[in-house]
Amino acid sequence: MNVHRVKFGSIVQNGLTTLKMAVLVAVCIIGVVFAATRAQTGASSAAKDNLGLNAAFEPGKDHHDFANTGMGFALAMVACLWAFDGWADVAFLGEELANPKFAMPVVVLVSVGTVAFLFILVNIAYMMVLTEDEISSSHALAIDFAQTIGGSTVAGVFAFAVFVSSVGSANGSILTGGRVFFAAARDGRFPAILATLGENSRSPYAALIAQGVVSSCLLLLPGASFASLLHYFAPASWLFYAATGSTVIVLRRKFPQVERPFHCPLYPLPPIVVIIVGLCLVVSCVASSPLFSCAALGFVFISYPVYYVVYRETVSAISGGAGSGGAGVGGGASSRGQLMSFSTDDIKGSGGSAGGQYLDPEGDYDANSSLTRRDAEDTA
């Protein structure tokens, strides 16, 4: 469906997201009603045991000593933070937003805030219904929650809701991830065929198909499972998040005169925190799952020599030529379509890249190399 049309894929994604949020709100309401009902009947309440003021300090209660196992906490954070990973995916669509300077910060702040709010409320709802032992031994909290509330029928409904949620998450990753292949190919870093757009759909179908092939290959590896994919994905992604945080500091020092449409409050604290957290999570992943983590990091590090050997001429041109515009940093680059404070136009000069591969001064896209204004409006 993402290959068929950008608009169609975004409609499906919005529908799945709305349904997912409705289910999460329902979980919160059901948890409160269930706990209140049990409290009125005088029955033993998991809410009192888990959320009472004295619960965390009850003498003799086993709270699992994480003081000496900080690695366990770090691993738990990898899985928890995956729930918020959409903040990074939205950046892949930045070039297609009609007004990224305004829309990008609003989308990130609202979405992350909403996810954090629902994340906390849903976990409180689980703790209102399930005991500590049930939570610690559960393999699917939502299903166990539903089983306790209404038996197998309600559990079946929640299982379907979890399926819909998973489809929505996968569709969002497909929609955004293909743009990385497309952008890299458009810049000459990947095979040019991956920068192909559908004649009628104007979607990067070749990049989306290539992404599907790579994902399928990972799933076909011996011993592949959700847990193994998490161990494969987490160290590589957090390594790049840490690297991205470092670029904010490096580029601000190296190119202080470049216009920056996105502000960084309390700079340089945010990028430093991202770097530290990212590296700590990478280390914890390697320590807990060395095989998959080292495979992922090895793949990343192997790409460096391959990149510089295969594309050494392009790299030299970018680092030394600074484009036909004269100055190494373009002073007249449009802020429309910039994903970060440093755009491709900034690298290549005020003239932009040859052939109109990037946004022109009016914000339109070249019909042969990028997405059209219509697709930008559809995505927005």
Image (cartoon, helix red, strand yellow):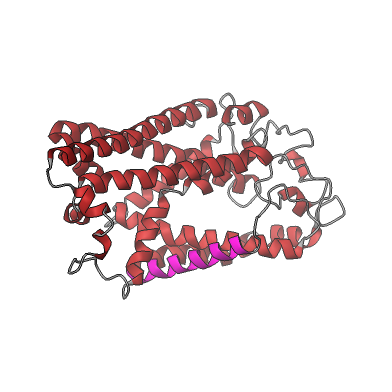
Q: Is residue 213 above or below residue 264?
A: above
Q: Left or right: 46 with respect to 315?
A: left
Q: Is residue 372 above or below residue 86?
A: above
Residue 115 % position (x, y): 44, 43
Q: Main secondary structure of the magenta part?
A: helix
Is residue 274 highlighted in magenta? yes
Is residue 234 highlighted in magenta? no
Viewer-proximal residue among 41 and 86: 41
Q: Left or right: 297 with respect to 290?
A: right
Q: Left or right: 282 with respect to 352?
A: left
Residue 338 % position (x, y): 69, 45
Viewer-proximal residue among 78 and 95: 78
Quarter of the image with the C terminus is: top right
- Find residue 314 and report its image quarter: bottom right
Residue 37 % position (x, y): 19, 36
Residue, x 35% and y 35% (percent of image)?
A: 25
Residue, x 78% and y 51% (percent of image)?
A: 259
Q: Left or right: 12 with respect to 204?
A: left
> Where are the magenta residues, as a range?
269-290
The answer to whether residue 371 is visible is yes
Residue 87 % position (x, y): 52, 47
Q: How many marks?
A: 0
Q: Is residue 360 above or below residue 72?
A: above
Residue, x 13% and y 35% (percent of image)?
A: 151
Residue, x 40% and y 31% (percent of image)?
A: 16
Instruction: Pick out the residue farthest to the right.
Output: 326
Viewer-proximal residue among 122 and 84: 122
Q: Is residue 337 above or below residue 68?
A: above
The answer to whether residue 292 is visible is no
